[in-house]
Amino acid sequence: MTEITKPQNFLNTKELMSLQPSQRKIYVHNKIMDILRMNENGVTISEVEKATGFDNSTVWRHLENLVSIREAYKKKRGPLTIYYKNGKLGHQTYREVCIVGNKSYVFDKIENNEGHFILIQEKEMDSLRKMNVKGGIMINIRDFPDVMKTLLQFCSRAIDE
């Protein structure tokens, strides 16, 4: 395992624990994002854990959250899972937006070198009236009709219960 590039000026454990929980969460998020940006060949959970001193579950939770909101992606390579900073997903060719209360559901057709995809993101307005991504999913456009068929069946059954 090679040494990954890491940002400078990490807080020590005492300094980190002196932060309020919300500040600590933002700090860890930012440091992990910095590591992803600095290591274009990807990183593993154990590499981030070793470089930062953050515990395994913290690193895993933050990386998985970044994947869920499409700021990062992961690939399996044998027994390893490697996380990468998500760059531009591709070229957006079409968009629809559905607004429900203070949430928006944004549907984008994305084209990149891996194919054509439908990206669905849930966004929510915060107290400062800024839209934040709460989650998302990207589905290959070839699979989308089957996914929608199953989703409609699921909704039909869930409503009947």
Image (tube, grey):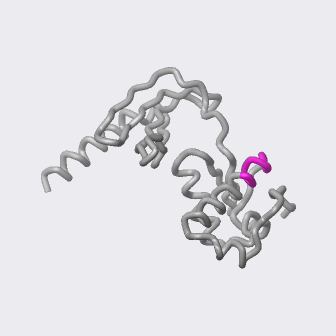
Q: Residue at x 29, y 41 (%)?
A: 101
Q: Residue furthest front?
A: 128
Q: What residue is drawn where x is 79% and y is 50%?
A: 39
**Can you give x and y, in whole percent of width and height, for residue 150 in the image?**
31, 43
Give the residue at x 53% y 28%. 110
Relative placement, left or right, of 89 versus 143 is right
Residue range in magenta is 34-40
Q: Choose between 156 and 143: the one closer to the eye.
A: 156
Q: Is residue 112 above or below residue 34?
A: above
In the rendered image, residue 8 lying in the magenta stretch gets the answer no
Q: Kindly give the residue lying farthest to the left in the view shown.
A: 160
Q: Nearer the viewer, residue 8 or 143?
A: 8
Left or right of 149? Residue 128 is right
Quarter of the picture holding the N terminus: bottom right
- Tell me the quarter of the picture where residue 105 sits: top left
The one of 130 and 7 positioned closer to us in this rendering: 130
Rendered residue at 65%/54% (across/down): 76
Viewed as shown, does residue 51 lie left or right of 137? right
Asked if residue 37 lies in the magenta stretch, the reply is yes
Q: Is residue 45 left or right of residue 41?
A: left
Percent of width and height locating residue 13:
72, 76
Give the residue at the far bottom of this rendering: 14
Image spot of residue 26 (x, y percent)? 61, 59
